[in-house]
Every structure is written in C-alpha cells, then in structure tokens.
Image (cartoon, helix red, strand yellow):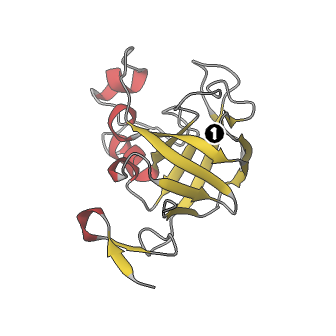
C-alpha cells in the first residue's frame, strides 16, 4: 500500500485507514424529537439519503447525520463541565480522528457497510446552548461535522470508522 500524507502530515493509507491507529465509533446517540437530549442507544439503522431511523433530526438534505469527536468533548470537560457523548446533539461520537479537519466530500465507512459523505463542517449556533452559557464556549459549532448517508445499514458502538477514497 502506498501511504499518502493527510492534513498535518498524518499517514493515510489507500486501504482507508486514517490515521493508521484505530478510529472507533464510541457512541451512537438519538432523540425522538428536535430539541430533546440525545441518549446512547448502542446501535442504529442509517437509511440512505435520510439519516438515522427514529432520530428527530433525520430527513433529507445535507445534514442527515452529525458526528463529533470525543477529543472535542474532552476540551469542554477540561473546563470542568460534566459532559459526555450525545450532550452536543451529535448522532455519532468518534475517537481517534480529528473530524473537523476532514474536507467536504470526504467519504467515511462506518462499520462494515455504511458509507457517509461529509457535507458540512461546523454550524451556526443561534441559541447559545447551556454548555456555552456555562463555559463561554461550545465545540459543536466549530468541530462537529455533518454527513449524508450514501449507503445505509447498521452502525454499532465499537465499530471502526475509516476514511475511504472517492471513486475516480
């Protein structure tokens, strides 16, 4: 396999592993409606061009699934705030990859078969959530990412997440 250099010189191999260390899905989070706290559900079904079945934020458009890295959550924890997976309304919490440094259009293989395409990095925060009011900061608007579901299937906590090359 020929290694390529990704952002910040990290190695990305053609087999889709980025970086070479394991990248994991550590939590899958849903809520039945918008504005409700997401809870860890262990596994979920992602539907093509829709999002997570049963999640209040699912539907068409470019923001079908939201992802946030545990490393981003840890930045708020370092400020003394007790937050965890799902507290930023992310559907999928990852570990081992700097999500907000991915390019729009990057493809991610979640688990064995789910193919996601990054569509947006960050978002506008109109309401200044409770986390922002407590610490004066919130990472989701800067470091959360959004994706659309190109190929659906099941995703579970503990699954691998890999960057895969786009078709030529």
Q: For residue 158, what is the image quadrant?
A: bottom right
Residue 74, horizontal then vertical, whole percent? 39, 48
Which residue corresponds to the image point at 60% horizontal and 49% vertical from the top-left? 27
Which residue corresponds to the image point at 68% horizontal and 30% vertical from the top-left? 55
**Residue 84, placed above or below residue 18:** above
Which residue corresponds to the image point at 27% horizontal and 26% vertical from the top-left? 136
**Taking 105 as reference, is 61 left or right?**
right
**Residue 128, placed above or below residue 112:** above
**Residue 30, placed above or below residue 22:** above
* Residue closest to the far bottom: 1
* Residue closest to the far left: 8
Count of numbered tags: 1
Decide which of 97, 151 is in the foreground and name it. 151
Q: For residue 28, what is the image quadrant?
A: top right
Can you identify the residue that label 1 sits on?
A: 29
- Element on which disc 1 rests: strand
Decide which of 89, 119 is in the foreground and name it. 119
* Residue closest to the far front: 168
Residue 90, horizontal then vertical, whole percent? 53, 37
Which residue corresponds to the image point at 35% horizontal and 37% vertical from the top-left? 139
Residue 127, horizontal then vertical, whole percent? 39, 14
**Is the residue marked by circle 1 packed among few (<14), some (14-19), or many (20+) residues within 10 Å?**
many
Residue 112, horizontal then vertical, whole percent? 69, 63
């Amino acid at each position: 396999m020929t290694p390529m250099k990704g952002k910040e010189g990290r190695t990305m191999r053609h087999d889709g592993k980025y970086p070479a260390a394991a990248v994991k899905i550590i939590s899958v989070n849903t809520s039945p409606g918008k504005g409700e706290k997401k809870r860890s559900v262990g596994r979920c079904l992602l539907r093509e061009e829709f999002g997570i079945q049963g999640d209040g934020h699912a539907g068409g458009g470019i923001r079908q699934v939201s992802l946030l890295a545990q490393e981003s959550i840890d930045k708020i924890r370092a400020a003394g705030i007790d937050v965890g997976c799902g507290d930023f309304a992310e559907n999928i919490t990852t570990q081992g990859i700097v999500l907000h440094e991915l390019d729009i259009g990057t493809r991610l293989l979640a688990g064995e078969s789910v193919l996601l395409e990054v569509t947006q990095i960050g978002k506008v925060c109109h309401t200044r959530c409770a986390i922002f009011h407590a610490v004066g900061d919130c990472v989701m608007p800067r470091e959360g990412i959004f994706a659309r579901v190109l190929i659906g299937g099941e995703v579970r906590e503990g699954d691998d997440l890999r960057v895969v090359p786009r078709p030529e």
